Image: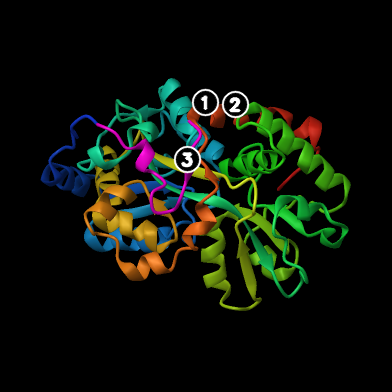
Amino acid sequence: MKKMMTAGVALVAMLGAAPLASAQSLDALIEGAKKEGMLSTIALPHDWCGYGGVIAGFKAKYPFLNVNELNPDAGSADEIEAIKANKDNKGPQAPDVIDVGLAFGPSAKAEGLLQPYKVATWDEIPDAIKDPEGHWYADYYGVMSFLVNKDLVANVPADWADLLKPEYAGQVALAGDPRASNQAILAVQAAGLSRGAAAGEAAGKAGLEFFKELNAAGNFVPVIGKAGTLAQGTTPIVIMWDYNALAARDTLAGNPPVEVVVPKSGVLAGVYVQGISAYAPQPNAAKLWMEYLYSDEGQLGWLKGYCHPARFNAMAAAGKLPADLMANLPPAESYEAAYFPTLDEVNANKAAVVGGWDATVGANVQ
């Protein structure tokens, strides 16, 4: 499914008829969650997609629940492993819910790690990015970008090929380990797309060759990049989702000055999905969390964090997207060349990147 989409209509082509939602009674969920008293999340940094505000909103709405935030900086693979490691553990180290890259939803379902649940707004989640049985469903998407420290980078790179220039020696980093982080895995595919490779395995292999060259040139820094490492000068250029880059820009507040660049080629859109652990110690709290995330309030919480929420098109059609929030997003033209890979392409790329990073690139990112 090769689509060229703008920000405002990016999900229109994926919308279609959906089965009726099968959400439990909200009152019943609230009563059940009150008895449980806690929700355990995992891998939700507060500056990722506005999650700090989303979590605060959930706590304000349901003050009887303690939100136990596990390992905020974990990657998608770590989340899956946390479910596996805690199958027989009903304690606070067992996650109730996960937020993972698109490729991890179906694989987690296949391994029996997720339980089905359809939220009340199920119909407004595009069919192409949800499991028909409700084991996983898209929450938001963004595009790959460069976050650049302008104090240390004289010429801001405009495209992937620029990163290979000698002037960027010791400056370029990924925002995760490409053997475990969905963000980093898809960054490799984006680099491959910029070289004309077809999405999927071909782009993954082409992306690995790009990072092999980047590493051989001395430009690649094997450190997980974030706002702090960028400000310190350890990773002056970090490849990350646009919403993370924009949030980091806000966090840094001009110290140092940064620029967020959507590259001219290899503009890759990435979808993340939600799921409830099949072994969730607090299943009612988990479902209540999902209802909140997919309510208008939760969806707008992600939009405040510069993400395009899954219900974006339906909410736009209903006039539910505030103009001030839309004005904070990058210009629509930044998304015009965005490519939304199919699930098969995402899976093929993941296999190529995870399986080939050590042998091809050989950089131990940590």
Q: Which residue sits at x=82%, y=60%?
A: 168
Categorize mark 2 by other alpha carbons within 10 Å: few (<14), some (14-19), many (20+).
some
Residue 344's label in the rendered image is: 1
* Residue 85 spot, x, y in % from top left: 50, 31
Residue 348's label in the rendered image is: 2
Identify which amino acid the numbered label 1 is placed on: Asp
Categorize mark 1 by other alpha carbons within 10 Å: few (<14), some (14-19), many (20+).
few
Residue 43's label in the rendered image is: none
Is 254 displayed left or right of 11 in the figure?
right
Q: Residue 363 appears in which quarter of the rendering?
A: top right
**Residue 14 located within the stretch drawn in magenta:** yes
Q: Is residue 278 visible?
A: no
Sequence order check: which comes first, mark 2 or mark 3? 3
What segment is highlighted magenta in the picture?
Answer: 1-17
Categorize mark 3 by other alpha carbons within 10 Å: few (<14), some (14-19), many (20+).
many
Confirm or deny contact between disc 1 and disc 2 (CB under 8 A): yes
The residue mark sitting in front, 3 or 1, is 1
Sequence order check: which comes first, mark 3 or mark 1? 3
Identify which amino acid the numbered label 3 is placed on: Val
Q: CA distance from mark 1 to mark 2?
A: 6 Å
Position above or below: 311 against 253: above
Is 333 displayed left or right of 301 in the figure?
right
Q: Residue 305 appears in which quarter of the rendering?
A: bottom left
